[in-house]
Amino acid sequence: MYFAENLKFIREKCGWSQAEAAGKLGIPRTTLGDYERGHTEPSLEALIAMARNYGVSIESLLCRRLRTIAWEEERPGWPRVVAVTVDAQNRPNIELVRTRAAAGYIDSFADPEFISELPHFQLPALQGRLRAFEIEGDSMLPLESGSIVVCRYVEKITDVKDGHCYVAVSMRDGVVYKRLQQDPKRNGFVCRSDNANYPAFALPWNEVRELWEYQAHIAFRDPAAIHQNLLEEKIEEIRKNVADLHRQYGESPSKHSH
């Protein structure tokens, strides 16, 4: 096993001191030092936390000598341990992460006990490892706040398709639903909203803890009514812009009204 050597190597690659890394892991610096020297073996919970924190698989952390392979091969990954629940017939459930549970999910997405307490449901038409997330805000209009997106688990960052919608889970940005575009020059993604009022932002690969690709959504309003509201808002915006132009050039908007 290469655990102790790998732990020190990855920390140094990240540019973190032992104190900084220990703080991120929530353990004493002396404990991390013991791990790195091979004096102490971590618990399973500590091992999962370290794999999540450093963005590598548990298998790689334990069994591969990371110093001898390309860092980029491991760095974009994340632990592939996905906590699941099943129904009485042993069929996988779709667990629902409500907005109010998002903060807890970021810390506990690999904790089977936490996942087991989430509400869940079944959609037989969809296959694969699925999870549902409640959407908050209007950044992805016409998908309204309160809608639920059902997503399939993404195994590898290289599986991400440019322009497709994903739920990305990261320590920095939380649980976000965006269109992703690969940005290999910056070792990350560009995250874009469907609502043009929201600027794009960068999400480094090493910040990502989970990715889920959009498969379907559940809305609670008539799509036609949503479209009509958006159209009315756009018309009102145009009216305001025209009125501003008239004021700018000293004209009365009424002269051009019919």
Image (tube, rainbow, N blue to C red):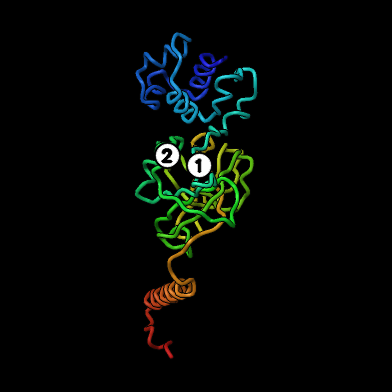
Observer-nearest residue: 103 or 150? 150
Give how far across and how far down residue 52 sits, in percent: 48, 31
**Which residue is the extreme one toward the front?**
88
Count of numbered circles in the view? 2
**Where does the N terminus fall, quadrant-wise?**
top right
Give how far across and how far down residue 222 sits, in percent: 46, 72
Q: Is the Cβ of the residue at disc 1 closer than 8 Å to that at disc 2?
A: yes
Observer-nearest residue: 181 or 217? 217
Give how far across and how far down residue 96 sits, in percent: 44, 50
Q: Looking at the image, is mark 1 or mark 2 earlier in the sequence?
A: 2
x 40%, y 58%: residue: 137
Local crowd size for mark 2, using a 10 Å CA cut-off: few (<14), some (14–19), many (≥20): few
The amino acid at mark 2 is Arg
x 63%, y 43%: residue: 159
Which of the 4 image quadrants contains residue 171? top left
Local crowd size for mark 1, using a 10 Å CA cut-off: few (<14), some (14–19), many (≥20): many
**Which residue is the extreme one toward the bottom?**
258
Residue pointed to by mark 2: 172
x 39%, y 22%: residue: 22
**Where does the C terminus fall, quadrant-wise?**
bottom left
Relative height, residue 241 to residue 71 (above, below): below
The amino acid at mark 1 is Leu
- Mark 1–mark 2 distance (CA, rounded to whole Å): 9 Å
Residue pointed to by mark 1: 203
Label 1: which secondary element: strand
Give how far across and how far down residue 100 sits, in percent: 34, 49
Label 2: which secondary element: loop
